[in-house]
Amino acid sequence: MRAVLVVAGLVGAVVALIRRRPRVAPGYTAIPRTHFLLRVPTGMAVDPALPGLVRPGAGTSVLVAVNPLTPDADAEEILTDLATGFTGVRAAAQGLELDRPQRLEVAGFPAVATTGIQRVGDARVRKAVVALITDDEFVMLTATLADDDPLSTPEALAVLTAARRGATRAPGDLGFDVTPAPGYHRSSHPGSALLLTLGPETGDDVPVFVVAASVDDVATPDEDRRDAALGRFAALPSTPTVDDAAAVEIAGLPGYEITGRGTGRWEAVYCTVLFRPAGYLVLSGWYDPLVHDDQHPAFRAMARSLVLTR
C-alpha cells in the first residue's frame, strides 16, 4: 500500500508540473566542456565558468560536474553509495536536508535524484540533485535555488531529469590554466575543473592535481580569508588536518598555501586557495607517500604556473 501511495504521489506531482507548464525556454542548450544539454529556465543563462546555468544577480545556479570513471568502476555500487550519502552523516555536516533518493534514468543512463534544502549559517537554499553514470563518466547535476527564486524545486528537478547527452563535448574555456609538471597529463574529461594525473591513467593509487573555481561569486573579506582557506582545505575528500599554512600571491590573487595529511589512502595533501574579487580558486593535490615520491614540488610548481584566461 505504501508503494502504491508513493507512486500515486509521484504521478500527481508530474501531472501538476505538466499543468503548470514550467518556465523554460524552448529547446536545449549545450553546457560548455560537457556532453550535456539542458533546457534553460526563463531568466537564466549559460555560465561557462561552472559549467552550467546561473540567474544573474541572484544565488541560483545549475552546476554540471563531470568526473571520469576508472575502467573497473561499478555503476550500481557508486549510485547506491551516493544515495546513502545523500541522507547520511556527511550530508548533515554540509547542512543538507535531502529527501530519500529516487532511482530513475536520465539521458538513458542509470541515475538517482533527490530534492531538499541546504542550510548555510542563518540562510538556506533549495536543492535539486541528480547523479548519473554514463559509460565513462560520473555526472552530478545540482540546482541551487535562492529561497525566493521564481523557479520551484520540482521545476528545477524537471530541468535536471530532462537533460540530454550529446555525441560530442561542447567547447568552452575554464577561465584558468596551469602548466603540467613533468610526468603529469591533462584529463580528457575537463568538466568543471582542470584535472591532471601523474601518467595518463587514473585510479586510486595515482597522484592527482585539480584546479577548480568556486560555484558562488561571493567576495571574501580580507580578515576572513585565512579561516575560509582552512575550511576549504578541511572539506577536501580525505578530510585532511593541517600541518602548515602560509600566505601566498599567485597570478595577482592573494591566498593561502596549505599542506597536511588525510585520513584515508591519500595521506599527503596540498592545497592553495586563491581569492578573486568574487569567488575563489582551489588548487589541490594528493598522493600516497608509501607509493610515490614527494609530489609537493610538482604541486607547488603547477600552482605557481597558474594563468587567468578571462
Image: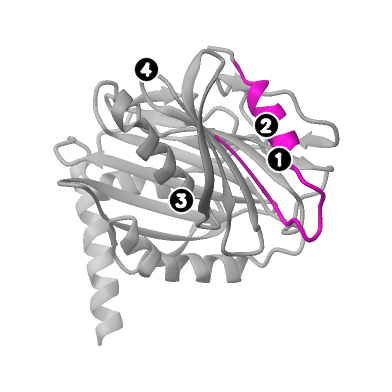
Mark 2 neighbour class, 10 Å CA radius: few under 14, some 14 to 19, many 20 or more = some
> Marks 4 and 3: which is nearer the front?
3
Q: CA distance from mark 4 to mark 1?
A: 28 Å
Disc with the residue nearer the chain's start (3 vs 2): 3
Q: Residue at x 67, y 67 (%)?
A: 74
Is 221 in front, or is 47? Answer: 221
- Label number found at residue 166: none
Quickly name the residue at label 3.
234
- Figure check: 304 above or below 114: above
Residue 187: in sight, yes or no?
no
- Label number found at residue 296: 1
Looking at the image, do the residues carrying marks 3 and 1 touch, with CB atoms under 8 Å apart?
no
Three-letter code, disc 4: Pro
Q: Bounds of the magenta span?
A: 283-307
Q: CA distance from mark 3 to mark 1?
A: 18 Å
Looking at the image, do the residues carrying marks 4 and 3 touch, with CB atoms under 8 Å apart?
no
Q: Position of residue 155 (x, y in %)?
A: 27, 45
Looking at the image, do the residues carrying marks 2 and 1 touch, with CB atoms under 8 Å apart?
yes
Q: CA distance from mark 4 to mark 3?
A: 23 Å
Q: CA distance from mark 2 to mark 4?
A: 23 Å
Is 15 in front, or is 43? Answer: 43
Mark 4 neighbour class, 10 Å CA radius: few under 14, some 14 to 19, many 20 or more = few
Q: Quadrant of residue 191?
A: top right
Mark 1 neighbour class, 10 Å CA radius: few under 14, some 14 to 19, many 20 or more = some
Three-letter code, disc 2: Arg
Quickly name the residue at label 2.
300
- Figure check: 3 above or below 221: below
Three-letter code, disc 3: Ala
Q: CA distance from mark 2 to mark 1?
A: 6 Å
Q: Image check: 82 left or right of 191? A: left
Q: CA distance from mark 3 to mark 2?
A: 19 Å
- Figure check: 161 above or below 62: below
